Image (cartoon, helix red, strand yellow):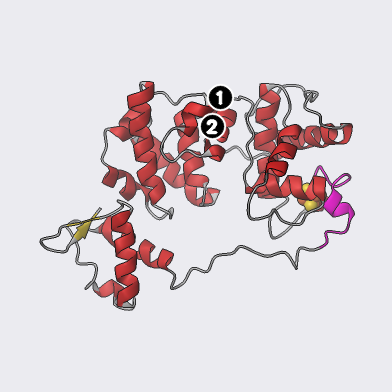
Amino acid sequence: MPSAPQNAPARLDTGADDRSVAMVDAVREWFRDAGRDLPWRGRSTPWGVLVSEVMLQQTPVVRVEPVWHAWMERWPTPADLAAATQADAIRAWGRLGYPRRAKRLWECAVAIVERHDGSVPSDLEQLRALPGVGDYTAAAVVSFAFHGRALVLDTNVRRVIGRAWRGEPLPAAHQTVGERAHALSLVPADDAGAAEWAVASMELGALVCTARVARCDACPLASSCAWFQAGCPGLEDAPRRTQPWHGTDRQVRGRIMALLRAASSPLNISGHAALADVEPGQLDRCLDGLLADGLATRDEATGRCSL
Ligand code: SF4
């Protein structure tokens, strides 16, 4: 049972019509029974919520959970992480992918210590000003950590709103002003209600109304969903933004980072046997990228690299 705010359903004073009010309330009610009891929900600190949001940006829950536990045990506060090295953070990131996030999270911890005395701020603008914290993450922290009213619009929420309200199979690549305004009009006016809608709509998109499968028979919106009522048209024609993986620069960067994380001394990446199958131009490009991003360093005298 999730521990989001359990207040009575709030009436909206945001311009939403009665149908929208009923749909929002239905999703909130569904969540109280069906939402997952994830460790960063309700019983974590604002720092724990912030760490979870950064980890979850591009990595599924099942892979994040063990790393999040280990991370929070080792660095339970921003000050603890700020006292570690950037290389420690990148090493602890393990195989979550997109290790730039580890670097930014470490920089974020340092900034929280310097600017906010070690406490994660609850103000949207102060959050947005932190390294690696964009609109979505700032709103998520306001909502999930401080139970404030914010527009939390990730891809899951966009998909649910797009299907249920507008009959669209999948969200467009980029948010529009109109889409954000519509989503904002659905957010309950009270803080606790808004926070519950945020986590509930996200959960519905993660568990029921997924990109690949819509489990409409288990959905609290089935009777009012525009897309379901229209017969779920257009999904097969919708462009899918799946990214290739094998042989990509992203995969090669990941392989280099795995070697550097495991190494006890600096490595010769260009001549490493484990990377012999990578075309030299691609290997150089990927290594240069990691060096430019500050995720790896190279001793210019020896040419050897480390975190
Ligand atoms: S009824 Fe189906 S398509 Fe509509 S929101 Fe629910 S799961 Fe998604």
Q: Nearer the viewer, residue 210 or 176?
A: 176
Whether residue 47 appears in this view of the structure is yes
Residue located beneath label 2 in the image: 141
**Would you say 290 lies left or right of 207 here?**
left
Residue located beneath label 1 in the image: 146
Q: Which stretch is magenta? A: 218-233
Q: Position of residue 7 (x, y in %)?
A: 72, 21
**Would you say 257 lies left or right of 218 here?**
left
Q: Quadrant of residue 215?
A: bottom right
Q: Nearer the viewer, residue 116 or 225?
A: 116
Q: Position of residue 272 (x, y in %)?
A: 23, 71
Q: Position of residue 45 (x, y in %)?
A: 48, 27
Q: Residue furthest left?
A: 301
* Residue at x 68% of width, y 57% of height: 211
Amino acid type shown at disc 2: Val
Quadrant where the image shows the N terminus = top right
Badge 2: residue crowd in 10 Å (few <14, some 14–19, many ≥20): many
**Would you say 80 lies left or right of 172 here?**
left
* Residue at x 19% of width, y 67% of height: 268
